[in-house]
Image: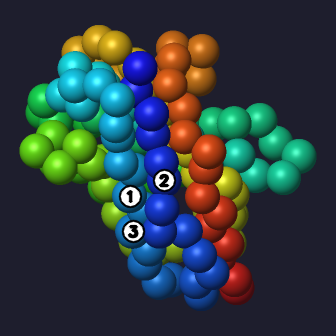
Amino acid sequence: QLQLVESGGGLVQAGNSLTLSCAGTGGTFSDYALGWFRQAPGKEREFVAAISRAGRVTNYAASVKGRFTVSRDNSKSTVILQMNRLKPEDTAIYFCAGRYTVTGATPTRDYTYWGQGTQVTVSS
């Protein structure tokens, strides 16, 4: 049973960067494709980025493409979301999610394992 714990959230000014980490335990980390999602107050949880279990394939939401980068280190059971040129509209709780298959996916329903989330607040 994969367990995920996010860290690295915080308060930053617009235009700055932040790095989120997600550590996995309780399973063979490289067996899982991983995704990042976010949820702003009053809004539905939305897809941000995903990475295949070997790290070869990534995909991004249009709103973050070119600013965010997802990567993973299976030897450390960690997935990273590097967020650059942050905007106030990036403010949300960010969640890490896992699915027991090769590639990531965009719908939240395709993920079985979820972390508790980490708050990111971008001030203007």
* Amino acid type for the residue under numbered disc 1: Ser
Q: Which residue is mark 1?
A: 21
Residues packed near mark 3 inside 10 Å, few (<14), some (14 to 19) or many (20 plus) = some
Marks 3 and 2, the one that precedes in the sequence = 2
Nearer the viewer's eye, disc 3 or disc 1? 1
Q: Which residue is mark 3?
A: 19
Give residue 101's quadrant in the image.
top left
Q: Which residue is mark 2?
A: 6
Decide: is 34 above or below 103.
below
At x 65%, y 63%, the residue is: 119
Quadrant containing the N terminus is top left
Marks 2 and 1, the one that precedes in the sequence = 2
Residue 97 percent coordinates (x, y) = 48, 33
Residue 49: mark in rendering: none
At x 15%, y 40%, the residue is: 74
Q: Residue furthest right?
A: 42
Give the CA separation, mark 2 to mark 1: 6 Å
* Amino acid type for the residue under numbered disc 2: Glu
Find numbered disc 3 in the image and state the secondary structure of the residue it sits on: strand
Find numbered disc 1 in the image and state the secondary structure of the residue it sits on: strand
